[in-house]
Amino acid sequence: MPAITDLQSLHAYLECASVAPEVFNLRPDYRVVLLAVSGIQPGPSDTASEALLRDAESSARAELSKRPVTEIPHIAAWQEAYKAISAKPKKHRNSLEALTPRIEPESGLNRLTDIYNAVSVKYQIPLGGEDLEKYSGPPKLYQATG
């Protein structure tokens, strides 16, 4: 997909995103937010992205000093959501639960991943990121099989 250079085209692209009905059948309270961020140059971790990871690590350590990772309110809520869809939360952890106890600035992979991992841990939300230029078609969320 070519770069989306204007706000109107980006809005139209995001309007085409979809969540399959079976997701809402499993969790009527499910909500998703799509964000588009520009200006993140592809490449390896750098001092700015590592600083974000250090800040997130500090937040995670402070939270983990008060309680185990599974008792952090947002993580506990995700565990309940997993149970509701018959997933085993101890076997299939969401990204936030898996990442919170092990985030470190040295664990950076690349700028984009560092940024969304840092935001996820600091603000306690499962979050992912994709390079829209590498996407084919609009984003879709559906229940996995297999």
Image: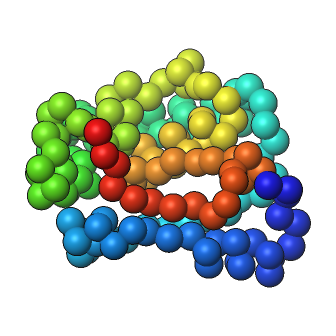
Indicate the position of residue 80 as horizontal and vertical percent values.
13, 55
Residue 73 shows in this picture: no
Indicate the position of residue 58 as horizontal and vertical percent values.
43, 35
Q: Residue at x 51, y 48 (%)?
A: 128
Judge whether 69 appears above or below 4 on screen: above
User: Most extreme residue toward the top, as rendered?
Assistant: 106
Q: Quadrant of the C terminus?
A: top left
Quadrant of the rendered image containing residue 10: bottom right
Q: Residue at x 53, y 21 (%)?
A: 107
Judge whether 88 appears above or below 108 on screen: below
Quadrant of the rendered image containing residue 99: top left
Q: Quadrant of the N terminus?
A: bottom right
> Is residue 64 shown left or right of residue 46?
left
Indicate the position of residue 97 as horizontal and vertical percent values.
29, 39
Q: Residue at x 34, y 48 (%)?
A: 144
Q: Nearer the viewer, residue 117 or 79?
A: 79
Judge whether 38 appears above or below 47 on screen: below
> Is residue 127 shown left or right of residue 144?
right
Q: Nearer the viewer, residue 68 or 36?
A: 36
